[in-house]
Image (cartoon, rainbow, N blue to C red):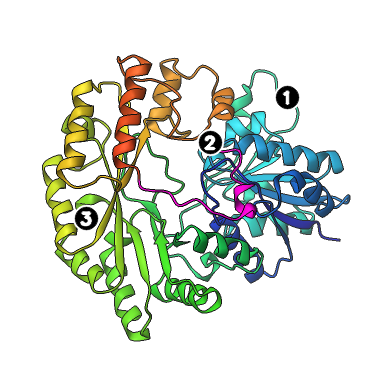
Amino acid sequence: MPYDVFIVNVSRKSVQVQLPIWLTVLANTLRLHNIDFDAIDLVPVDTADRERVFRERIPSKPAIIGFNIMAGNDQINQVEKFAGIALDINPEHIIIYGGALPSSMPELLLNNCKCAYILVGEGEKAFPAFIRSIWAGNFRPDNIPGIFYRLNGSIFGIKPDKMIVGARVNNMYQLTALSASNYESLDMEFYIKYLKETNQSFDIMGSRGCKGNCSFCHKLVQGIGVKSPDMILDEMAGIINNHDLDRFYFVDENFLEIKALYKDFIVKKQRLGMNFTYRGQCRIDAIDEEICSLGRDNGLAVVATGIESVNQETLNRVSKGIRIRDVEGKLALLRKYGIGVSANFIVGFPWDTEKDYIDMIDFIKRNGLEKKGKLSYLTPSPGTRLWRECVNNGQIKDEWEFIKSLGNLFFERTINFTKLPDEVLDHYFNEITALIQRPVTYPKSDTYLEKLSSLY
C-alpha cells in the first residue's frame, strides 16, 4: 500500500496573510503526475486550533509529509514543531523539507532538523520521483537529483557535514504545465476576502530566478525560468472569473525586463480583450521607453525595483550592477508615463556613514519617493555571499542558532555591520522608514486580525 502524501503550509509571523504559491505549484504537479495527496494549509486555521487540526489530519500509518520553509519570521521553529508532532504520531513518517531555506543550506538543516530529506531547488520533477521511488520499494535518493539526505550511522574519520549525500537538480529554464498553479487545495475564499479587505493585489509568478548577483540576495535557482504568456494569462483569467479580482502583483524579480516574454504577454492580453491592472518587478536599469509605453497602455500600475543605496561605491561593492547617476533618469521616465514606483533601499552596509543616510533622505525627497517604498536592514540571509562572510569572520558563530533566531527578516536589526552605534543606525532606519514606507491597510475582520495578533 503506497504511503499517503501530505504537503503542509505552516504559518510564519508576518504583517500580512500570504497565499502559498509553492503549494499551488506542487499541488498542480502532483495532480499531473497522478499522485494523490492531501494539502494541509494551517494559515486559515485559528491559531489556537492549528495543532489540533494538524493532529487530526495526520494518519497513524507511515506517510510522506512535506514542508516548505522560508528563512526568518520564526517559520523554521514552527515547521520543526509540526514535524515533531508528526513524528510523535508515528516515528516512521517520512519528513522532507523544501523551499528557500532548505535549498540554501541542506547540510545544516539535515544535521539539526527533524527532517530525513531535503528537496533542493525546484520540486516539479524531484518530489514526484521521490514519492514514486518510495512507493516502488526501491528507494535510492542518490539517484534522484534534488534530494539530499544524511547517511545513517557514523563513519570514523568523516566529519558530519561530509555525510550528506545529494546532487542539485538542473534548472527548468522553460517552465511547463507542471509549474502552473492549481488553487483547488486552498481555502480561496479566505485569501480572496483578505486581499479585497486590504485592497491588495493577487500574487502571481511569470518567471523564476534573477539575473542579478547581489551579495546579500539568495537565489533558489541560477538563471531565469519563464512561463509562457498563455500559462500566465490562463491563471489570471481563472482568478478574474472565479473570484472577481482583477489586480495582480508579479512577485518574480525580472518579469518586466524579459522583453520578448513581456511583449508577447501584452500582445496576447490585447488579443483576449482582458482587462486588469498589475504591479511588476524589474531591475531599475531595465526600465526604458518601450517598457513604460507598453505598460502604461496595458494596465501596468506600479514598478517595484531595488535601488538599495545612493552611494555608487556601495553599489559596486555589493555587485548591484547599476549606476546611481542613471537611476534618477529611470524614475523620471516612470513619472513621465504615469507609472507608480515602489523603491527598495537598504541601510547597514559596513562602510555606511551618517552622510550616506542623509543623502538617501535627500534622494527620496528629490525624486518624490515619499510613501513609495520600503527600507530594510542589511541582513545575512542563509546561502548568500554575505552569510559566508559573516561565518568566516566570526560574526555568525553558530549558524543553526542564528537561523532559528531570525525574526522579522530585514525589518529587525540582527547584526550592526557599520561603525555607527546601534542607536544611530536605528535612528536613521526609523527616520527613513517613516519617510518612504508605503501606507498599510490592515484588515478589519476578526478572522484576519486574530492571525496577525503576534506581529512584531
**Residue 84 in the image, given as x and y percentages of width and height:** 77, 37
Residue at far right of view: 60
Whole-angstrom CA distance, mark 1 to mark 3, is: 51 Å
Say which quarter of the image contains residue 27.
bottom right
Marker disc for residue 154: 1
Q: Mark 1 and mark 2: span between their CA atoms?
A: 31 Å
60 inside magenta stretch: no
What residue do we see at 22% from left, 42% from top?
A: 321
Residue type at numbered disc 3: Ala
Q: Position of residue 45 (x, y in %)?
A: 70, 53
> Horizontally, is 190 left or right of 90 in the view?
left
* Residue at image coords 42%, 76%: 230
Q: Nearer the viewer, mark 1 or mark 2?
A: 2
Q: Secondary structure at mark 1?
A: loop
Q: Which residues are the magenta region?
A: 438-456
**Is residue 325 shown left or right of residue 268?**
left
Marks 2 and 3, Cα distance to the nearest angstrom?
A: 30 Å
Mark 2 closeness class: few <14, some 14–19, many ≥20 residues within 10 Å: many
Query: How packed is label 1: few (under 14 Cα within 10 Å), some, or many (20 or more)?
Result: few
